[in-house]
Image (cartoon, rainbow, N blue to C red):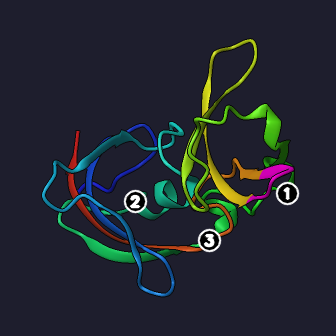
Amino acid sequence: MKQAQTGDNVEVHYKGTLPDGQLFDSSEGREPLNFTLGSGQVIKGFDDGVTGMEIGDKKTIHIPNAEAYGPINEEMIINFERAQIPADVPLEIGGTLNMHQDGNGQVIPVVVCEVTEEYVILDANHPLAGQDLIFELELVAIK
């Protein structure tokens, strides 16, 4: 039977959890994830985990954060003067805001970490940065 390899278009059902068992994503109730192996469409550890699987194979993979969304980057934690943020913008700890990068129009989601009268600390790291990930995989198709 054919094994999935770099360049193959594959369909995968998955369930992603953190080491404490918290579910962060799943294809349950949806179409399987469709991507091309080795194309960079998914994180490296996921790509590596699917490579070599055959249609119908199921397995669980553990991905260290270095092969997922990387470690937390302290440079992505930003301290803003409170006065720089409009008063009508809700600033709840754990809430998400969208920042617009100058020049290219790209929008970056940030999480509000701390709010005082003088400053606001925002975290622009990916929500799963610094986390090791666990995926239950099932290879559905190789095209």
Three-letter amino acid code at the position of disc 3: Gln
Examine the image and state in which quarter residue 60 appears: bottom left
Left/right placement of residue 112 relative to residue 103 reads: left
Of the residues under marks 3 and 2, which one precedes in the sequence?
A: 2
Disc 1 and disc 3 in contact, CB within 8 angstroms: no
Quadrant where the N terminus lies? bottom left
The stretch in magenta equals 115-120
Q: Disc number at residue 50? A: 2
Whole-angstrom CA distance, mark 1 to mark 3, is 15 Å
Of the residues under marks 2 and 1, which one precedes in the sequence?
A: 2
Residue denoted by label 1: 74
Residue drawn at point x = 74 percent, y = 63 percent: 71
Element under disc 1: helix
Element under disc 3: loop
Q: Residues within 10 Å of mark 1 (few under 14, many from 20)?
A: few
Residue 2 position in % (x across, y down): 26, 54
Residue denoted by label 3: 131
Q: Residues within 10 Å of mark 3 (few under 14, many from 20)?
A: some
Three-letter amino acid code at the position of disc 2: Val
Q: Mark 2 or 1, which is nearer the eye?
A: 1
Examine the image and state in which quarter residue 65 appears: bottom right
